[in-house]
Amino acid sequence: MCASSGVFGGHRVILAPMAGVSDPVFRLLCTEAGADVAFTEMVSAKGLSYANEKTRHLVDLLPQEGRVGVQLFGHEPDTMAEQARWVEAELGERLAWLDINMGCPARKIVKKGDGSALMKDPAAASAIVSAVKGAATHPVTVKFRRGWSEEAGEAAPLFARRMQEAGADAVTVHGRFAMQFYQGSSDAGCIARVKEAVTIPVIGNGDVACGTDAVRLLEETGCDAVMVGRAAQGNPLVFADIQAALEGKAALPPPALEDRIALARRHVDGLLAIRPRAAAYLRKHAMWYLHGAPHAAVARGKLAHCSTQEEFHAVFDEVLRAQAGTGGPHAAPSL
C-alpha cells in the first residue's frame, strides 16, 4: 500500500463520517475493535463559522481517542477554508486529515448546494478543494458518489480527476448514485474505474458489511483502503472481522448478544457521562445493538422511552434474561 502511505500512514480500514451516529464513544468502540481511523460526524463549515456550540461539539474528542478524520460540508470556498484552519488549530496533531463532503444525498443538505449537489457543479467543487488545500497543512480528501443520478450517468472517474487536479490528496468513492440514497447495490466497478482514472489513493465505500466484503472490494477494485458505515451501527466488532480477513485469518463468528449488549452499556455510560442530555440520541444506537435479539420489537418499544442510564440498563438486563430463559415460560412478556 505504498501509494497511500503518505496520506493514510498504512491505515486500510476507516469508520465513515456518519451524521447523527459517529459520536466520540462510538468512534472509540470502533477503533478498539479494529478501525484504523474513525471520522467525526460531518460538520457544517457554516455552523462552525457562527461559532455554534452545537456544531463545535461535533469535533470534541475523548482523551483516550487517537487521531481522527474530520469531514466538513458546505459550498462556500472561503468559509470552508477558514473553518479547515479552525479545525486544524483546535485539534492539532490529533487530526489525521480533513475530508470534504460531496456525497451526502440528504435533501436538507443538497437543497443548499452542499453534499452530493456539488457533483453537478465540478467547477464549484474544484474551487472548494483548492481553497481548503491552500489553507490546510493536513492532507485533504474528498468523498463523493458514483454520480448524481442513473439518468445523468456515472460521473465519478472524471470528477475524481478534477478533484485530483484541484489538489485533493485522496478520494473516497461510494458506488451508488446520490438519488439512489442507500437503495440497490453499490457498484464496485465504479470504484475500480476511479482508481484507474487517478494517481492519488482511493478509498472504497459501500456495502462493506464483513471481512469478506472488504477483501473482495480491495481485490476487485485495487482501492487503497475501505470505509465502513452502516455495518458498524450496533456492531463495532465488524472491524475485528475485517482486520482478521485482511490478515488472512478465518472469518470471525457473529458477535454474541452478550458482547453486543456489553458494548451498548459502554456506549450509553460513556456518552451520558460527557453529554447528559444524549438519552434520546442513544435510543437508536441501543436499538441497533439489540438487532435480532429475542423479542427485540418489544425491547425497542421500551428503549424508545429510556431517559436515564438505569432505564437503558434495565432493558438490556431484560433482554439478556429473555435470551437465557431464566425467567421461565412467562419471561418474554416481561419485556
Image (tube, grey):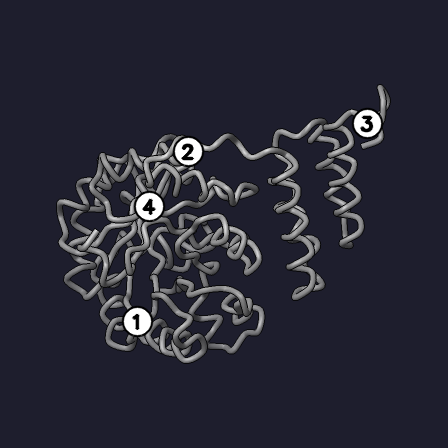
Front of the two marks 3 and 2: 3
Residue under label 4, please give it.
Answer: 226
Residue 301 relative to residue 77: left or right: right
Query: Which of the 4 image quarters holds residue 3?
Result: bottom left
Q: Which residue is mark 3?
A: 326
Secondary structure state at the residue bearing disc 4:
strand
Label placed on residue 138: 1
Disc with the residue nearer the chain's start (1 vs 2): 1
Task: Tell me the residue at 34%/70% (across/down).
Answer: 76
Classed neighbour count for the residue bearing mark 1: other residues with Cα under 10 Å, few (<14), some (14–19), many (≥20): some
- Which SS class for mark 3? loop
Looking at the image, which is closer to me, 68 or 284?
Answer: 68
Task: Give the CA separation, mark 1 to mark 4.
Answer: 20 Å
Spot occupied by residue 195 in the image (x, y as percentages of width and height):
18, 46
What's the amino acid at mark 2?
Gln
Toward the viewer: 260 or 46?
A: 260
In terms of sequence position, does the residue under pointer 3 or pointer 2 come before the other?
Answer: 2
**Helix, strand or loop for disc 1:** loop
Residue 89 x %, y %? 41, 80
Q: Nearer the viewer, residue 104 or 302?
A: 302
Q: Earlier in the sequence, mark 4 or mark 2?
A: 2
Please give left or right for residue 279 compared with residue 162 in the image: right
Question: Is residue 93 placed above or below 264 in the rendered structure?
Answer: below
Q: CA distance from mark 1 to mark 2?
A: 34 Å
Residue position for label 2: 183
Disc 1 to disc 3, C-alpha distance: 54 Å
- Count residues near mark 4 (Cα–Cα under 10 Å), then give few for <14, some for 14-19, many for 20+: many
> Real-space Cα distance between discs 4 and 3?
42 Å
Please give the count of numbered marks on the rendered protein: 4
Q: Amino acid at mark 3?
A: Thr
